[in-house]
Amino acid sequence: MHYLLTYELVDDYLDRRADYRDAHLALAWQAVDRGDLLLAGALEDPVDTAALLFEGESAASAEAFANADPYVRNGLVKSWCVRPWKTVVGKMASTPVR
């Protein structure tokens, strides 16, 4: 199953992220290496939201990531949410439907 972790970012996120980016990216790549995190990044125009796509049996790895993320812990994220995402089209779809 896929889980989408979304962040609502603070207005000055781009100005503040440099202090925590290396630690955030290290945590993200560790999640990739474990097979939990598939894709991640910030939405642009405006940069007010980030989306991280997780894969697993439950939302636990996405929730654990958010709780450990330096961006969350240091106030760059106003709020976050994990939602199940029933993907149905594409090579990586969790429940393909043709």
Image (cartoon, helix red, strand yellow):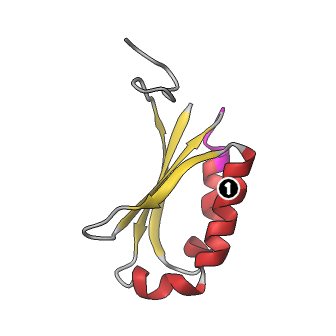
Q: Nearer the viewer, residue 40 or 72?
A: 40
Q: Is residue 55 above or below residue 62?
A: above
Instruction: Please report the residue visible at 61 percent of the width from the left and 50 percent of the height from the top.
Output: 62
Which quadrant of the view contains residue 23? bottom right
Q: Is residue 60 magenta?
A: yes
Q: Is residue 11 magenta?
A: no
Q: Magenta-highlighted stretch: main secondary structure? A: loop
> Number of callouts in the render?
1
Horizontal side of 84 relative to 60 (left or right) equals left
Q: Position of residue 4 (x, y in %)?
A: 48, 46
Instruction: Please report the residue visible at 39 percent of the width from the left and 24 percent of the height from the top.
Output: 89
Horizontal side of 28 relative to 7 (left or right) equals right
Q: Which residue is mark 1?
A: 64
Which quadrant of the view contains residue 30? bottom right
Q: Is residue 68 above or below residue 5?
A: below
Q: Is residue 69 visible?
A: no
Horizontal side of 2 relative to 7 (left or right) equals right
Residue type at the position of mark 1? Ala
Instruction: Please report the residue visible at 66 percent of the width from the left and 50 percent of the height from the top.
Output: 32
Specify the segment rendered in magenta. 57-61
Farthest residue toward the front?
91
Instruction: Please report the residue visible at 54 percent of the width from the left and 85 percent of the height from the top.
Output: 18
Q: Position of residue 36 (x, y in %)?
A: 66, 44
> Which quadrant holds the N terminus?
top right
Q: Nearer the viewer, residue 23 or 6?
A: 23
Horizontal side of 27 relative to 91 (left or right) equals right
